[in-house]
Amino acid sequence: MNTTSFSRREFFGTALAAGALAGGISTHGAEKPGSFAEPARTIPVDDWADVIVAGGGPAGVSAAVSAARAGAKVRLFELQGCLGGVWTAGLLSYIFDFNKSDIGWEIIRRLDAYGARRLDKPGEDGMKFYRQGIDKDWVYEPEYMKAVCEDMCAEAGVRVILQCPVTAVYRDASGRNIETVITESKTGRQAWRAHTFIDCTGDGDLAARAGCGFDIGYGPEGWGQPATLNALVVVDDGDAVAAADFVSNEPAMWTRHASSETGKQTSHHILASHKLKAELLRAGLEPSYGDPTLFRIHRNLFCFMANHEYKLRIDDAQAISDATIRARREILSLAAGLAKLGGPWKGFRVAATAEQIGHRDARRIHGRYTVTRDDVTAGATFPDAVTTSYFGIDIHGLDKKSNNVRAAGQNHGVKFRPFQIPLRACRARDVDNLYMAGRNISGDFYAHASYRVTGSSVAIGEAVGKAAASFLERR
């Protein structure tokens, strides 16, 4: 009887080939080690929308609602399982520089109707750019922010698809316009067309996949500001924590006091952060963020911002995953350390960590104008302005040493004056029917360090949504 000896590799190779012939497994592209040639396939195209918005965060919701209210048929694709982006999936919980657009005021009114907002009332000696109204800066409850974003989109007629990122972008024959975008979701791979597209992904994912030029980070290595994973925490007695001055938004964040360390005037926010850090050090823990912060959201519920992940590129999925896991472990460790101190920290425990780590930096997509450091120092104005940034230059240390030795937020010596952002900075240079809204607009590292906050994102999104709808009329 003849016998044949099969090696392990030969056995599995034969099995794979048999499966392929049976229609079970494709070996297409396997002939090239280290690569895989994906088979081409034809998928149906949905062309219902006039405007497609990628990203359902602060800028995306504002842009989608604004465009829909202007008469456009709008689809909104969001990566996470809820709208709101860093507000909700990111548990940001605190908002800066907000009351400067119609949709911004509407969000305020809707949150107030839910009783889901805590006001900070600036003192008379508060920072001068925050004297324009008590609704510049405030804390909110993330779950109710989800409902506000969903309600606004539904009422405007925006068709929302969650857990549905844009994964590929194709231009038309001219090369100057986006024709089709591809998404991947539970439904599978789908193709969509529209007349106009708005990249509100924060990181500029749609524009990058369309082949647009962009800048990223700071210096030759391209490292950006650190990212933070926020958390919601609970404690037995929130009043005790607040009374001990560990909470940044209670009393008024911008009230100024003499520092016990230097005698110089500093904000309550900084003093509260310093006291919180001292408590963590007393517990034998040094946080990766030099200014750990507690914001009181509701009674015994707080936002805990104590983590920084350094030199994290926004286009490296493995690095982002590793950083998120590492950050979550740090937050749990810091919380356990505070709980062991007892006193006002009795019962201190993590209730939830964010679904997404919060990036301060982003791809800054090349637009038809680039907002620069010179515009910031000059307090530039523009005839096509979409909003004004009142938030100062806020650059967190690019490594742990600089973030813990000096103040976490630096201005790098850049003199700040409120400056306007032109619509031209929100329209892609390399594609004619693509707008950007949010922190991925066209600007340099220093200007970005001011306009990156969500108050600006909402105002930019509202203006860009209107522009995208009016773009349809010009085609």
Image (cartoon, rainbow, N blue to C red):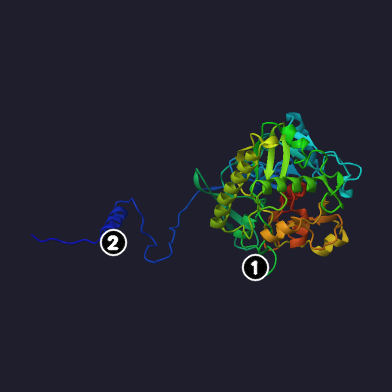
Q: Are marks 2 and 1 in contact (CB under 8 Å)?
A: no
Q: Secondary structure at mark 2?
A: helix
Left or right of 414 on screen, residue 400: left
The single residue placed furthest to the bottom in the displayed view is 220
Q: Is residue 398 visible?
A: no
Mark 2 → mark 1, Cα distance in angstroms: 43 Å
Quadrant in the picture for the N terminus: bottom left
171 w.r.t. 44: above or below: below
Q: Which mark is residue 31?
A: none
Left or right of 125 on screen, residue 83: left
Viewer-nearest residue: 304 or 217:
304
Quadrant in the picture for the C terminus: bottom right
Q: Which mark is residue 9?
A: 2
Residue type beneath disc 2: Arg
Viewer-nearest residue: 50 or 102:
102
**Total tally of numbered discs in the picture:** 2
Q: Secondary structure at mark 1?
A: loop
Left or right of 302 on screen, residue 254: right
Viewer-nearest residue: 330 or 18:
330
**x, y percentage for residue 97?**
80, 46
Viewer-nearest residue: 129 or 260:
260
Which tag, 2 or 1, sits closer to the chain's start?
2
User: How dense is the environment of label 1, judged by Cα within 10 Å: few (below 14), some, or many (20 and up)?
Assistant: few
Q: Is residue 259 visible?
A: yes
Residue on which the image places disc 1: 221
**x, y percentage for residue 467?**
75, 50
**x, y percentage for residue 241?**
73, 36
Left or right of 32 on screen, residue 296: right
Residue type beneath disc 1: Glu
Q: Quadrant of residue 111?
A: top right
